[in-house]
Image: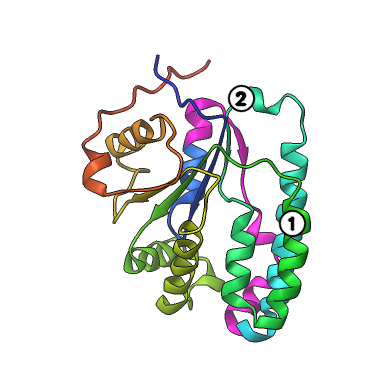
Amino acid sequence: MPRIPHRFIAIEGNIGAGKTTLCQMLARDFGCHLILEQFTDNPFLPCFYENPERYAFPVELFFMTERHKQLQEHLSQPDLFQELIVADYFFIKTLLFAKNNLNDEEFRLFKRLFHVLNATFPRPELLVYLHRPVPVLLEHIRKRGRTYEQDIKPEYLQSVQQAYFEFFRTEQYTPVLIVDLEDADFQTDPAAYRKLLSLLARPLHQGVRRVPIEEWQALPEFPLPAPTK
């Protein structure tokens, strides 16, 4: 039976790309250890979307400390790496969003704190970035109906996307797959989901690789394991 050969996969992407949904589907089908960001616990987030300049620093500081606490709790278990771990974020996300949202002085301080905290974490074996056009992201955000997200501007999503791509140009240690999804819906299209799994099951290659939608949709469908009783 084919399997996903990696032990630690981080799924990344812009707001509304489908990161958490894909992670939950992987956990359902492979029984993997799931790490999901608890972003709804951030009390500054609604205020940030209304007044980003005033609330950028507290919102990013809260995210960083909560992500650090969560990853420390999950990744410090000694026998954890005997099973597949899937996370819907990579800790570097903390720095990318902060760079995008903070002024220069705030970011210099934030970056010093980040590097201290980041030094303790293992890197994922594979980082998967789910890439969708901004209009598709906005439609997903509208459909899921979180009140505080409804005023997110396309310019903000474009700036987040740019921050990720700037990071990918310098990343040297973690293999990165940038997967062009366009408007493909792996949640409602089982064939698309299984073809995406076939992509994730391929051998690792160092560096950054972008996979057009035509390429991964031409892959054979991954045979899912039988449901556990």
Left or right: 81 with respect to 132? right
Q: At 71% from the left edge and 75% from the top edge, which residue is drawn?
A: 108
Left or right: 213 with respect to 146? left
Rendered image: mark on residue 218? none
Q: Is-magenta flag for residue 31?
A: yes
**Amino acid type, mark 2:** Glu
- Mark 2 residue crowding within 10 angstroms, few (<14) / some (14–19) / many (20+): some
Residue 181 in the image: above or below residue 6: below
* Label 2 element class: loop
Residue 221 in the image: above or below residue 211: above
Nearest the viewer among 26 and 208 is 208
Q: Quadrant of residue 109?
A: bottom right
> What residue did someone put label 1 on?
66
Q: Can residue 180 be seen in this view?
A: yes
* Label 1 element class: helix
Q: CA gap, disc 1 to disc 2?
A: 24 Å
Q: Can residue 43 be seen in this view?
A: no
> What residue did someone put label 2 on?
83
Left or right: 184 with respect to 108? left
Q: Where is residue 4 in the image (x, y as percent from the top left)?
A: 46, 26
Q: In the picture, which quadrant includes the N terminus?
A: top left
**Amino acid type, mark 1:** Glu
Q: Earlier in the sequence, mark 1 or mark 2?
A: 1
Q: Position of residue 2 (x, y in %)?
A: 39, 18
Q: Is-magenta flag for residue 48?
A: yes
Residue 197 in the image: above or below residue 95: above
Nearest the viewer among 161 and 28 is 161
Nearest the viewer among 62 and 104 is 104
Q: Give the range drawn in magenta.
A: 26-51
Q: Where is residue 173 in the image (x, y as percent from the top left)?
A: 55, 45
Q: At 29% from the left edge and 55% from the top edge, which residue is drawn?
A: 183
